[in-house]
Amino acid sequence: MSVLPTFSTSAATGAAKKKKDSRKIRQRQLFRVSSVAAGIQFGWALQLSLLTPYVQELGIPHTFASYIWLCGPITGMIVQPIVGYYSDNCGSRWGRRRPFLVAGCVCVIIAVLIIGFSADLGHLFGDSMESTTKTRAIVMFVLGFWLLDLANNTLQGPCRALLADLTGRSQKRTRRANAFFSLFMAIGNILGFATGAYGNWAKVFPFAITTACDMACANLKSAFFLDIIMLIFTTLLSITAAPETENKAFFWELFSTMKTLPRQMWYILLVTALTWVAWFPFLLYDTDWMGHEIYRGQPDSRLQARTDLYNKGVRMGSFGLMLNSVVLGLTSLMVEPLCRRVGPSYLWGFADVILAFCFAGIVGITKVAEKGRSPPSAGVLTVVLLLFSILGIPLAVTYSVPYALTASYTSSIGGGQGLSMGVLNLAVVIPQVIISLGSGPWDQAFGGGNIPSFLVASGAALIGGVLAISKLPKTHTKRDHKPPPIEVEFPTPGIRRTRSAPVFSKMA
């Protein structure tokens, strides 16, 4: 039986109790829950800065390196919705989200150990030291990489859902919690990219150097040792921060009947997809672009000077990503007040327009670098590092606003936050599949560089920005305690509420 738009005394009492329980979660507890993002992002930063160059050292050509990154979106499409659904329904005495956070942490540790020791394992199973392509090491690397993406998806979905559970229907608290999450992602990025930019970790962990693992390999291995320490610390900090709230509503009905989603929710998914089509070429190839096209080095060259140039470019790219993360962290602190002032849809649109112009600038500076000397001049490096830094602004918006809008919508219809984040994740992983499959052939067809992918990224970001400004639901900029009680203007004439979950009816 559907619930009428009036409240009984018991319903009002329950609502008041729920509101009171929500207020028990203090801001510092949300801050601690968000801290696990730093541990997750530390490892992700190491992936972005070190792994694309490393797979080329193992013997995978640049053209095929992008296929390795298919692991993430394929596991993301399957794992996040499933994990989200089961975390919504988990009846463990440890809570609904905590078991998945701990399981994800353990899987990450196993995965990074496999990746770090892939050259050693390949040598143990028969790889020749004289061979330029180390087949068995590549197999171990891909296995570890796939497990790492599975583990990251197991961690991120429940963590976002836990934040949404704790903030309830408060739009301000939801935006603030996602801003905290974005801030800790920035902190993880800063530490991760700084770790990747430092080239002497093997001196700190001398046992990392082995017969099969040279200095560059040992630096990667040592960096992942630090990742393990960071992840364990932040996971413990997060799971002990606050008691979990009860929420029996499910989102499976929404997932299984996506055709009944309101049009505005489809626009959120579309803009999210376009934004990530723009981001992935940069996130996958930023350090490789620095090594190849700005420093004009080659990772597998027989000339040591060209290899050294490439490695120097990779380290400079990691430094640029560290600057990007500093700006990301500072901008994260401004996202919530900016959303209140201009509205999240306009903020997201403006951020995507900035993204489009930055990627167009990357194409331009690449053309300038091609005509200049190698290594690049101070002027070229200054412009490149400036572009890296500016990109931290739209990245902060990408890491927070889509999730806040989705959490607000889910809360407004009484849905389960775990699976809703899994559904949103589909709009993230599908673009990654497109880029992973297409960027290698595109780049090879136009001379082997990264420019075609960046041109696609610039166009996607511009289209996404226009759609965000013109099509996304507008919000009221008043404070949460003033009417209307639900700020995001999602029309929901097709939704009927029941005591357990929203039921979707056909539009009149």
Image (cartoon, rainbow, N blue to C red):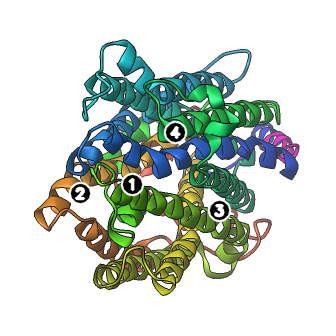
Residues at discs 3 and 4 in contact (Cβ within 8 Å): no
Q: Work out whether residue 389 or residue 203 is closer to the camera in this orientation and state it.
A: 203
Q: What segment is highlighted magenta in the picture?
A: 16-25
For image coordinates 33% across by 78% down, the residue present is: 366
Residue 96 shown left or right of residue 64 in the figure: right
Of mark 2 and mark 4, the one earlier in the sequence is 4
The 10 Å Cα crowd at callout 3, few under 14, some 14 to 19, many 20 or more, is: some
In the picture of the structure, the residue carrying the numbered disc 3 is 486
In the picture of the structure, the residue carrying the numbered disc 2 is 439
Q: Nearer the viewer, mark 2 or mark 3?
A: 2
For image coordinates 41% across by 83% down, the residue present is: 357
In the picture of the structure, the residue carrying the numbered disc 1 is 284
Residues at discs 1 and 2 in contact (Cβ within 8 Å): yes
The percent position of residue 109, horizontal first and vertical second, equals 58, 25
**Whether residue 508 can be seen here:** no
Q: Work out whether residue 485 or residue 285 is closer to the camera in this orientation and state it.
A: 285
The percent position of residue 385, horizontal first and vertical second, equals 53, 75
Distance from disc 1 to disc 2, alpha carbons, whole Å, reads: 10 Å
